[in-house]
Image (spheres, rainbow, N blue to C red):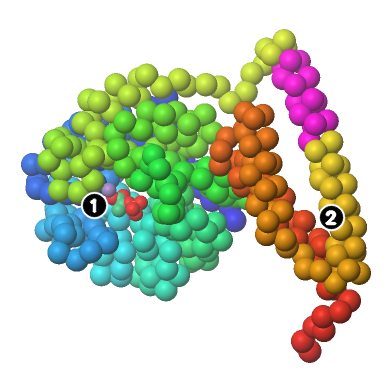
């Protein structure tokens, strides 16, 4: 897939080469939209955002002001001379947004998770070359995210970008949604022409995490941010704890460190090359060792098979698991990595043993 980068969408770009989408979680009143957009503009926003229809977990909470808010956002965006983006979740939203003159749309995390809903939106957009941002689905499923992007691409949309807003998992602490940076990085690797921006507000859930998440986004070379700003965050009708005043967003962006993505300094390049050589050697050794370890696992599988005993002895696994995780942590590797690493090493061992023990004996069903 070949996409048009956001910088070629005709949007004014001047915030240290990063795209900044800012504005309130929800449009509440005409005055609140105007004040919030003004704050976002002063923080350097290239594009405004505001939610008109809010997908909420439970009914009877604030579900957005609806169509009545469309003229408020259009008028304020015009006043401050920036395009505005809103979330659409069904064909009637698309129709109303296009009719009102909204310049950009985004697909929310609770919509990109549902291929039927995405397709309905794509169909409602037939023939409209409007820029679209697609948030990751709430669950950590890269293929589902790609599927949503593909549906727009198939319909001829090229002004498409991704938004990484974190994933809903059982333990996202300290954040509201787990960043799982590996997923958007893999999306970047697979589709280099697709710009991906980061929504630190919905990852964070709390203002205090915004600076470090925003810094990480630029250190990982994402194309920019979508950040929720509000003229009176504490009294916001939705997502109060994560919204920032425009002036505080400006201060935060000024304290971030903007690094170059490459250097021409020969000394730096030589040192980097030497370190990368070490890493390449070490990776090769680790991979060889893993191969050897699995050969031993296969040997064990053969013995167990001959002796007629099962693959998994829970007592041994429990002891080994605790010991190995502790040893991994002792090498100053993170808790999460240590448990995940030992678990997946063991999973692969079981797969290898099972292939030795069962491959020739279990009949495959007829194709
Ligand atoms: C939002 O941007 O206000 C929103 C509802 O986000 P998400 O779809 O990421 O939850
Ligand atoms: Mn929000």
Q: On screen, 251 above or below 33?
A: above
Comparing 94 with 277, the one in front is: 277
Of labels 1 and 2, the one closer to you: 2
Q: Residue at x 89, y 53 (%)?
A: 295
Q: On screen, 322 above or below 353?
A: above
Comparing 249 with 289, the one in front is: 289
Say which element carries label 2: helix
Residues in magenta?
A: 269-283
User: 111 left or right of 349?
Assistant: left
Q: Residue at x 35, y 25 (%)?
A: 253
Rendering quarter of residue 275: top right
Q: Is residue 174 magenta-colored?
A: no
Comparing 290 with 273, the one in front is: 290
Residue 356 shows in this picture: no
User: 34 left or right of 209?
Assistant: left
Please tell me the numbered disc located at residue 297: 2
Mark 2: few/some/many CA within 10 Å (<14, 14-19, 20+):
many
Comparing 316 with 345, the one in front is: 316
Please tell me the numbered disc located at residue 51: 1
Mark 1: few/some/many CA within 10 Å (<14, 14-19, 20+):
many
State the image coordinates of residue 364 (x, y, percent, origin top left).
80, 83
Say which element carries label 1: loop
Q: Mark 2 near ligand 1 (CB under 8 Å)?
A: no
User: 182 left or right of 73?
Assistant: right
Q: Mark 1 near ligand 1 (CB under 8 Å)?
A: yes
State the image coordinates of residue 126 (x, y, percent, origin top left).
40, 69
State the image coordinates of residue 108 (x, y, percent, origin top left).
36, 57
């Amino acid at each position: 897939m070949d996409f048009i980068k956001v910088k070629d969408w005709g949007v004014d770009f001047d915030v240290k080469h990063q795209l900044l989408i800012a504005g309130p979680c929800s449009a509440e009143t005409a005055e609140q939209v105007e004040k919030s957009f003004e704050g976002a503009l002063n923080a350097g926003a290239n594009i405004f955002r505001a939610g008109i229809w809010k997908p909420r977990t439970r009914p009877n909470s604030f579900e957005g002001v609806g169509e009545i808010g469309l003229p408020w956002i259009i008028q304020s965006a015009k006043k401050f001379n920036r395009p505005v983006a809103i979330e659409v979740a069904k064909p009637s939203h698309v129709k109303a947004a296009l009719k009102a003159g909204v310049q950009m749309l985004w697909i929310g995390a609770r919509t990109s998770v549902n291929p039927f809903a995405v397709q309905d939106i794509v169909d409602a957009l037939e023939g409209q070359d409007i820029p679209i941002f697609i948030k990751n689905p709430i669950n950590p499923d890269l293929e589902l995210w790609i599927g949503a992007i593909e549906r727009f691409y198939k319909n001829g949309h090229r002004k498409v970008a991704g938004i990484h807003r974190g994933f809903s998992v059982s333990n996202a602490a300290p954040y509201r949604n787990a960043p799982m940076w590996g997923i958007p990085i893999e999306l970047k690797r697979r589709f280099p022409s697709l710009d991906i921006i980061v929504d630190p507000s919905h990852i964070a859930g709390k203002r205090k995490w915004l600076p470090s998440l925003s810094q990480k986004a630029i250190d990982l070379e994402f194309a920019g941010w979508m950040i929720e700003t509000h003229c009176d965050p504490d009294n916001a009708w939705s997502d109060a704890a994560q919204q920032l005043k425009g002036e505080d967003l400006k201060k935060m962006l000024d304290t971030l460190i903007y690094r170059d993505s490459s250097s021409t300094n020969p000394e730096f390049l030589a040192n980097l090359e030497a370190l990368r050589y070490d890493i390449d050697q070490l990776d090769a050794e680790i991979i060889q060792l893993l191969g050897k370890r699995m050969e031993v696992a296969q040997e064990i599988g053969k013995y167990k098979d001959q002796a007629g005993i099962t693959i998994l002895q829970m007592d041994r696994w429990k002891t080994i698991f605790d010991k190995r995780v502790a040893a991994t942590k002792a090498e100053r590797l993170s808790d999460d990595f240590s448990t995940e690493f030992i678990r997946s090493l063991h999973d692969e061992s079981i797969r290898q043993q099972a292939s030795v023990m069962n491959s020739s004996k279990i009949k495959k069903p007829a194709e």
